[in-house]
Image (cartoon, helix red, strand yellow):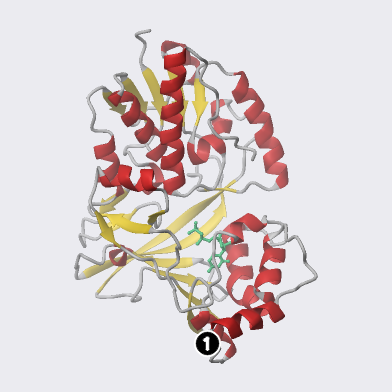
Amino acid sequence: MNKNIAIVGAGFSGAVIANQLAHAGYQVEIFEARPHIAGNCHSERDAETGVMVHIYGPHIFHTDNERVWEFVNRFSEFKPYVNRVKAITNGKVYTLPINLLTINQFFGKTLRPAEAEEFLRELGDKSIENPATFEDQALRFVGRELYEAFFKTYTMKQWGLHPNQLPASILKRLPVRFNYDDNYFAHKYQGMPANGYTELVERILDVPGITVHLNTRFDPSSKGDYAHVFYSGPIDAWFKHAEGRLPYRTLDFEVFRDTGDYQGNAVINYCDDAERYTRITEHKHFSPWESHEGTVCYKEYSRQCEEKDIPYYPIRLARDKQQLELYVNLARQEQNVTFVGRLGTYRYLDMDVTINEALVTADRFLACAREQAAMPAFTIDPLA
Ligand code: UDP
């Protein structure tokens, strides 16, 4: 077998698989439709201010996975960064995720951890035994007042849906803490690549045997020219949307510049309907080890993703999963194609999960090649 491997998409999924396969001796061609690598993690220095900007919105690296942390650290220095999100609601500023300070400030109390836990237990709706929706999960664990102040409106702005239509899994991303720890993430490792995500991905791709074609769409009908195709584009696009378009949310960013410090923090969420945007991110605060006179901020607006937009968040309501199942069945009939990543499997994935799955996918491919077994269309079940 001397045909090359094709990889569609130069985000983390594509880059990590390319790296592993090139090290194993394969010739790998990557096809990237956009003019840059790194997918939605792409970062670029702003020409005017020198600030490293997360072009497609904030990406904070956090993981518990030793293999993933060791892997990314081979390609970039990671600078310490801890995400501490502030939230504005009803004209006041609080800290997120909901922690002891949030609870005490919100209710005007001075509770200690065990008292706050008991207090929230009282506020929670105990009649909801198995919360399935976002709203039920919130009402069960934090009660109506905190839910309405911090989650209900933000979620409607973010998802365009009432939280009683959304799965509980979305809220489960956020912890509730009964201490003063306001680190947004609970993972062992957290940090930022010293020179941005694009340089990190560039280094992952810097292996002899990898060729990257930018501004180049891959035509699924040419899959026969390759020994195997790893596809990290939208699964429905591979099949020319034969079963309809899978719904996504997309983001619009209103970019503005200022001097000095605009908001004093990297991320401030706007949790009520005083503003249409969900959050303002001030990018220089994502690189606290740098100093810049100017500053670049993004006001972030979420809306339904249309044909020409960049997909961000898969929605995955029950009906979307039924539609996904049709595509998964089609994908399983494909020969020599494996679907990977957020768009290839239509899942809300963090970067570390994406990288881990890409490593596992490459392992699997190499094992299949050794054993002369067929490589499956998925290495994880997108419907799980
Ligand atoms: N969320 C919310 N209020 C907030 C922050 C988050 O209601 O202030 C909800 C919202 O539905 C969001 C979800 O929690 O989509 C997950 O939040 P996360 O910060 O993980 O979202 P991301 O940074 O991935 O957009």
Q: Would you place residue 326 above or below residue 56 in this image?
A: above
Q: Would you place residue 228 above or below residue 316 in this image?
A: above
| Residue reaching furthest to the right | 127
Percent position of residue 9, x then y: 40, 33
Which residue is denoted by mark 1 in the rendering?
A: 105
* Residue 384 found in image quarter: top right
* Residue 334 found in image quarter: top right
Percent position of residue 332, x then y: 61, 23
Image quadrant occupied by the N terminus: top left
Q: Nearer the viewer, residue 242 or 184?
A: 184
Residue drawn at 39 percent across, 33 percent down: 14
In the image, taking residue 375 as reference, residue 25 lies left or right, namely: left
Q: Is residue 242 visible?
A: no
Q: Where is ligand 1, by quadrant?
A: bottom right
Neighbours of disc 1 within 10 Å: few (<14), some (14-19), many (20+): some
Residue drawn at 51 percent across, 76 percent down: 99
Residue drawn at 46 percent across, 38 percent down: 357
